[in-house]
């Protein structure tokens, strides 16, 4: 279980690395109606490029464009920062012979509740990355 925090941090580092590479681009979903073609286009705007309007027989679907826009790099970076703050609050601490969460299971340096390490918040922080290499089944929140 001691590998959990470094593993989550590595996932966040990877999310941050990818988002930083495109942080100058806003990802925006836009729907427009073409009167001449009597057609509604669903377009993902990445920076100054419209993506998805001219894919011929395989156009970007509206839900795909909306979903991609929800993962705008600025949002990903904000999410990474928020998760790091959560992780900073939830750290393991050993009391006697067991590990507890500094936030969930300890008060004034004493074990306050039976929330052992890793706490549910940390397991939930790791869960979105369950498909990535290194994730352990023992980290699954419902395991
Ligand atoms: Zn906790």
Image (cartoon, helix red, strand yellow):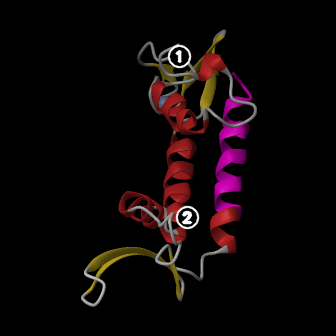
Is residue 33 positioned above or below 141 on the image? below
Residue at the spot of label 2: 77
Q: Quadrant of residue 16?
A: bottom right
Query: x, y percentage for residue 128?
Result: 54, 38
Residue at the spot of label 1: 116
Residue found at x 69% / y 21%: 1
Is residue 95 positioned above or below 74 on the image? above
Query: x, y percentage for residue 25?
Result: 56, 81
Residue found at x 62% / y 28%: 92
In the image, is 55 to the left or to the right of 30? right
Residue found at x 62% / y 66%: 19
Out of 90 and 69, give the one closest to the viewer. 69
Q: Residues within 10 Å of mark 2 (few under 14, many from 20)?
A: many
Query: x, y percentage for residue 40?
Result: 29, 76
Residue 113 in magenta stretch: no
Question: Can residue 34 be seen from the camera position used here?
Answer: yes
In the image, is 11 to the left or to the right of 91? right
Q: Residues within 10 Å of mark 1 (few under 14, many from 20)?
A: some
In the image, is 110 to the left or to the right of 19? left
Q: Secondary structure at mark 2?
A: helix
Asked if marks 2 and 1 touch (Cβ < 8 Å), the reply is no
Question: Can residue 107 be seen from the camera position used here?
Answer: no
The range drawn in magenta is 1-17
Is residue 104 positioned above or below 83 on the image? above
Of callouts 2 and 1, the N-terminal one:
2
Compute the Cα span from label 2 to label 1: 30 Å
What secondary structure prevails in the magenta region?
helix
In this view, which residue lies farthest toward the top? 97
């Amino acid at each position: 279980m001691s590998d959990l925090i470094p593993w989550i941090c590595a996932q966040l580092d990877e999310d941050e690395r990818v988002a930083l590479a495109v942080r100058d681009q806003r990802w925006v979903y836009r729907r427009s109606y073409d009167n001449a073609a009597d057609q509604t286009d669903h377009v993902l705007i990445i920076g100054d490029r419209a993506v998805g309007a001219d894919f011929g027989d395989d156009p970007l679907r509206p839900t795909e464009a909306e979903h991609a826009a929800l993962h705008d790099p600025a949002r990903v970076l904000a999410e990474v920062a928020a998760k790091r703050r959560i992780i900073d609050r939830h750290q393991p601490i050993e009391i006697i012979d067991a590990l507890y969460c500094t936030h969930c299971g300890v008060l004034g340096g004493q074990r306050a509740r039976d929330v052992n390490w890793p706490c549910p918040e940390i397991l939930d922080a790791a869960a979105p990355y369950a498909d990535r290499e290194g994730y352990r089944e023992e980290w699954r929140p419902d395991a």
